[in-house]
Image: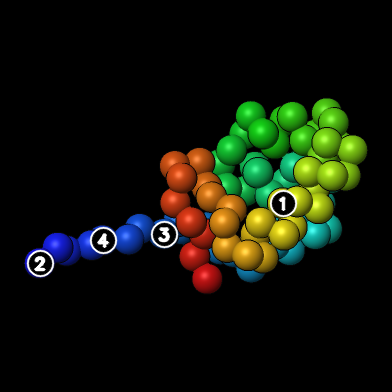
Amino acid sequence: MANYVTSTSDKSKKTALLLCVFLGWIGIHYFYVGRIGMGILYLFTFGFCGIGWIVDIIKIAMGSFRDNVGAPLRE
């Protein structure tokens, strides 16, 4: 019998979603989850002109957004 261990991030999905909705156009949600490079890219491109910002809101809400080590955000 296989033993499965799932790890989740110590970062909150709710916090990331709120940060993304209100400050996502400058990449604050990426800084929060530890993905500094993407945060800087969003900062200079204004969330890829808003398109990436909307996609990230959907990804966080659906649960497919990951932190800097690839772990899903905790509920």
Find residue 5 and name its label. Answer: 4
Residue at left 65%, top 44%? Answer: 30
Q: Which residue is mark 2?
A: 1
Select label 1 or label 2 by which is in front: 2
Select label 4 or label 3 by which is in front: 4
Q: Are marks 4 and 3 in contact (CB under 8 Å)?
A: no
Q: CA distance from mark 2 to mark 3?
A: 23 Å
Q: Earlier in the sequence, mark 1 or mark 3?
A: 3
Q: CA distance from mark 1 to mark 4?
A: 27 Å
Q: Earlier in the sequence, mark 2 or mark 3?
A: 2
Residue 66: x percent and y percent?
53, 50
Q: Which residue is mark 3?
A: 8
Q: CA distance from mark 4 to mark 3?
A: 10 Å
**Element type at marker 3?**
loop
Give left or right: position of 5 versus 35.
left
Q: CA distance from mark 1 to mark 2?
A: 37 Å
Q: Earlier in the sequence, mark 1 or mark 2?
A: 2
Q: Are marks 1 and 4 in contact (CB under 8 Å)?
A: no
Q: Earlier in the sequence, mark 1 or mark 4?
A: 4
Q: Amino acid at mark 2?
A: Met
Find residue 56 and name its label. Answer: 1
Q: Looking at the picture, tell me which residue is in the foreground, 62 or 8.
A: 62
Residue 42: x percent and y percent?
77, 35
